[in-house]
Every structure is written in C-alpha cells, then in structure tokens.
Image: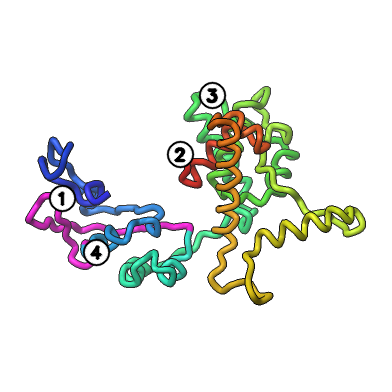
Amino acid sequence: MESELFGHLKGSFTGADKDKQGLFQAAKGGTLFLDEIADLPLQIQVKLLRVIQEKAVRPVGSQKEEAVDVRLLSATHKNLAREVELGNMRQDLFFRINVIELAVPSLRERQEDLQELTLTILNKIAKEDATTVCEIDDEALASLRQYSFPGNVRELENILQRAATLCEDRIIRAANLEFMNIPQAAETVEEIHPQAISDNAAQINNIVPESSSNDIPSDFSLEKHLESIEIGAIEKALEETRWNKTAAAKKLGNSFRSLRYRLKNLGLD
C-alpha cells in the first residue's frame, strides 16, 4: 500500500524490478481521491499524515523526499469520529482531512433522486453494452421507490444491471427486479400468530447483545452486529455447500450475482 501511494525505487524490495510512481506523484498539481480512508492501516495513516503536513513524499527505498502539491479528497461509509474513539483512526489525521465535510445521505433518504439516477444508470448500462437504452415502466419504478436500498446507489446499479439483462423488449417491469430477501414486519398485530411472536422475540434477543442491564451497551453498533450475522450466515451456507457459490446462493434465497456482490462488499472474496 505504501508503494501504491508513494511509489518505490527499483530494487527496494523483492519484485521491484523498476521504479514506480505513486498515486501522490501521479496526482501532482491535481486532485487525489482516497476512497474508504477509514480502512487504512494505522502505520499507513502515520505516513499519510506526514505527507499532508510536509507536502512531500519519500518513495520506498529512497533517501530523498519529493515535493507534491495535491488537493486531497477522501470518502468513507464509517463515522470517523467514532473510529477515532475506537482507536481505528488517528485523531491527528482525522483533524487534518476533516477540513470541509460533505455528508451524502443514503439513497433511501433522497427518494426524489431515484428516477433520475435510474435513467442515468440505464443510459450507462446501454453505452457499456452497446445496446439500446432500456425503458422502465411505472410499476417497476414504484417498486424501486418502496425499497429501502441497504446497499445504496451501488445496489441500485446492480439491480438495474440484472433487470436490463433479463427483461424482454428492452422494457424493465416489476417482475424483472430482484431485491434483497429481507422479511417485512406484519402490518397488524391481529395477523401475527402467537408462535410467530415468540419466534420474533427470540430473534430480537439474538440481535441485541446480552447485558447485565436493560440498556444497550454504549459501544454497541447495530451495523457491525448485523454485518457479523450476515457474514456468519454466508460462511455457514458456503461450508454446507462445500464452497459452491451457486448452491450457497440458492440456500440463502439469493441469486448468484447478489451473493457475489455481498461477498465483495463484505470483503469475503
């Protein structure tokens, strides 16, 4: 990672058969975008902080620093202040990069953008596949509006890519849309069977970690807890199917493509 960011000299390590320019040198005089900056290892965070402060990089294997003038943009899906508290991110780096913060709402919080995003993505798909642009009927668009999109815009793109492949006459209908299989809560209490109430209570007890008090622990993260449950279910399905992804996807009630997306998103590739 250090080599990717700051470059290296020939012979500086095994496999370094020629000099390599790092991303900071390549972006000199321009803008460098670092995605998921919260996932950088702490030892790289130290080096990144120094580059930002000194405005100079030292390639791996070099004794000399090279001045760089770069505008830095970074993104993350995590709460950086929380990551600082957990010790996953250096506080000094956080203050250095958090000059201007722009919070992008999740897709479910900006439904007014859904139609325009859908049309833009369908045009992109058609251009990449060198085909005519798919249309989407009103019923399918209404189905998209009713969905919560836990995977945000990436999931929307995945859903539309699949639908564009499976639809007929280049028209995407509601039947062509495949969403994550998330159980929906019953609309009325009268419709719930007593046994279902007992089962749901057991599931809730499994979600919230055990504690000596009735309160949820202060360090509890619902996102991380649900992610660990999802990882556990996927790994169990893969083990039971001898790591056959197609069979595992069927066992989980998902398509192969949906499972592949989840594996990549959860870092299980």
Q: Few, some or many C-alpha atoms within 10 Å of disc 4 (few <14, some 14-19, many ≥20)? A: some
The answer to which of marks 4 and 2 sits earlier in the sequence is 4
Q: Which residue is mark 1?
A: 60
**As drawn, 180 above or below 68:** above
The answer to which of marks 2 and 3 sits earlier in the sequence is 3
Label 3 sits on a secondary structure element that is loop
Q: CA distance from mark 4 to mark 2?
A: 32 Å
Label 4 sits on a secondary structure element that is helix
| Residue at left offset 56%, top offset 74% | 218
Q: Which residues are magenta?
A: 51-77
| Residue at left offset 7%, top offset 55% | 63
Check the image and name the residue furthest to the right.
190
Residue type at the position of mark 2? Asp
Label 1 sits on a secondary structure element that is loop
Residue 121 place in picture, x, y as percent:
54, 39
Comparing 11 with 242, the one in front is 242
The answer to which of marks 1 and 4 sits earlier in the sequence is 4
The answer to which of marks 3 and 1 sits earlier in the sequence is 1
Q: Are marks 1 and 4 in contact (CB under 8 Å)?
A: no
Q: Few, some or many C-alpha atoms within 10 Å of disc 3 (few <14, some 14-19, many ≥20)? A: few
| Residue at left offset 59%, top offset 29% | 246
Residue type at the position of mark 1? Val
Residue type at the position of mark 3? Thr
Q: Is residue 32 left or right of residue 177?
A: left
Q: Which residue is mark 2?
A: 269
Q: Which residue is mark 3?
A: 131
